[in-house]
Image (cartoon, rainbow, N blue to C red):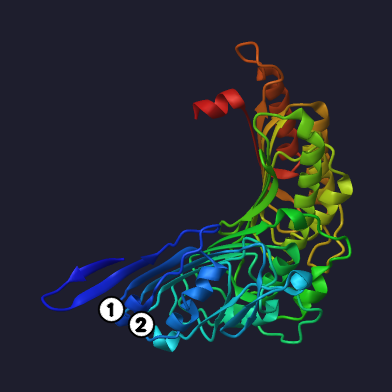
Amino acid sequence: MTSYDSTKVAIVQHAVFCPPLPPTIQTIDLAVLQQYASTVTVLELGPMSYQTFLAADVPMLLVRAMPQLTDFKLVLIPPNKLFIPTDFELVLTPPNTASSTVLPQVRLRLERIPALQSLHIQGATLVCDSFSRLKRLELYNTTQAPLGHTCAEFLAMLSTGKALEHLVLENYMGMMDAEDPTAFHFPLMCKTALVKDSARNLFRLLAHLSEVPDDMRMVVIRSTIRVPEDLDPLPLKGLYPPMQKSVHCATFKSLVRDDGIELVCAGSKHIISIEDSTTPPMPFLDPARTTVHNAALNVLSHFLVFMPVSTLEISDPMDITENKTWFKLLERAPNVSELIITKRGPSKAVCKIFTALASFSSQAVETAVRCPHLKDVKVRGTVYSRALVDTIGQTAKWRAEHRGPFRSLELVLAPRAPSGPRPCEFASIVARRWAKKLTGNGYVDRVRITDDVEESRE
């Protein structure tokens, strides 16, 4: 504990309690802090064990009035045995009832800490009537133990956070209710949000939001990366009013990491991208990459139901992905006006995406083509092939004939081989002749062809 001495009164402004963790059990005495509750501005408790949490009588400290407290952080480290909360009376759970255990509850009364702006809770279930004054909220359930609230109860609590600027939630929305009878929606107006949870809980969160942050990052928990085929968010979306503004979400990445596989969906205004990143290539992980990539596309196709995005970016699509996957994905992106495809190497996957664009949509829109508002398409890094230009040309012609024409096409071609001073010069010349035919026939207004060498010079 650090203190500042005035002439006669010691004023504690920044208090930190970090006792030894088990197997060393040491009771800490917070009685001293009780004397300075009216002057503390920053309070950090932990990491501490649940035993220490109880022995130090932390729950009783938290109900004291602390009018100057602006920042509060509590980190609890779970033991082998968890606790069953009964308000502030927390009891050790017998080993034979471990399946019913939940994280302990921490109840905060914000009327007694009116200056609180930053709250960080890890390893406990937060119970709070309102987040109305908070600017930063971070809640972590790193053990994935059951929480003491349902998803609906937590969302009702989150909806009170009118002043939130930064939000972090890790596996904290609670168990999904079998049914959600409360058809309410609310804006989440914070500047940044990071939410890590199951796909089902993320769907539920989006269904309740009328507006989302400008920068929103969602992470699907690795163990729940597979989205069941019977999971259809369309009925769920129909229960709630649609978002009132364009969604500022998402970037999707499927990353092969040293410690496993992680699917990430991150936020950027009006942009959705999906990336499969493995650098350097690891052939022994190809089956894992395929699984994650297909799961990412599956998750993305479900999330697109909630996202009226204007730009769709697809990075390194895998050739093994089936055509029906791209048909399903693009079916759920009717508002996309710009498509960016980055693909190094052969163009098989790019051809599949363009094939899906030359098809009818089952949605009732002003024109029957998939992605009816799509105007600008960019393809970067792929190798020139006759199949590539033929497929793109056929798609451009088909869409022009069915009232869904492209306005512009841009191809940045990669060399066929790394040797030679101008390895893709011939391909570029042939492609430029093909481009003139497209514009001459009126299928596309503008077509621009460059190669990697020219692109790097610009």
Q: Which residue is mark 1?
A: 39
The amino acid at mark 1 is Thr
Specify whether 343 is left or right of 26.
right
What is the quadrant of residue 104 in the picture? bottom right
**Place of residue 106 in the rendered image (x, y in percent of width and height, measured from the top left):** 54, 78
Q: Is residue 132 above or below residue 78?
A: below
Q: Is residue 130 above or below residue 71?
A: below
Picture quarter with the N terminus = bottom left
SS at mark 1?
loop
Mark seen at residue 381 = none
The amino acid at mark 2 is Met
What is the quadrant of residue 158 in the picture? bottom right
**Place of residue 270 in the rendered image (x, y in percent of width and height, measured from the top left):** 59, 59
SS at mark 2?
loop
How many numbered discs, if any?
Answer: 2
Q: Is residue 375 above or below residue 412?
A: below
Q: Find the distance from the CA under tag 1 to the CA under tag 2.
A: 7 Å
Q: Given the current orientation, which residue lies at the most extreme left position? A: 7
Q: Earlier in the sequence, mark 1 or mark 2?
A: 1
**Residue drawn at 36 percent across, 74 percent down:** 70
Mark seen at residue 66 = 2
What crowding class fits label 1: few (fewer than 14 Cα within 10 Å), some (14-19), or many (20 or more)? some
**Place of residue 439 in the rendered image (x, y in percent of width and height, measured from the top left):** 71, 39
**Place of residue 20 in the rendered image (x, y in percent of width and height, measured from the top left):** 47, 59
Is residue 403 in view? no
**Residue drawn at 67 percent across, 70 percent down:** 206
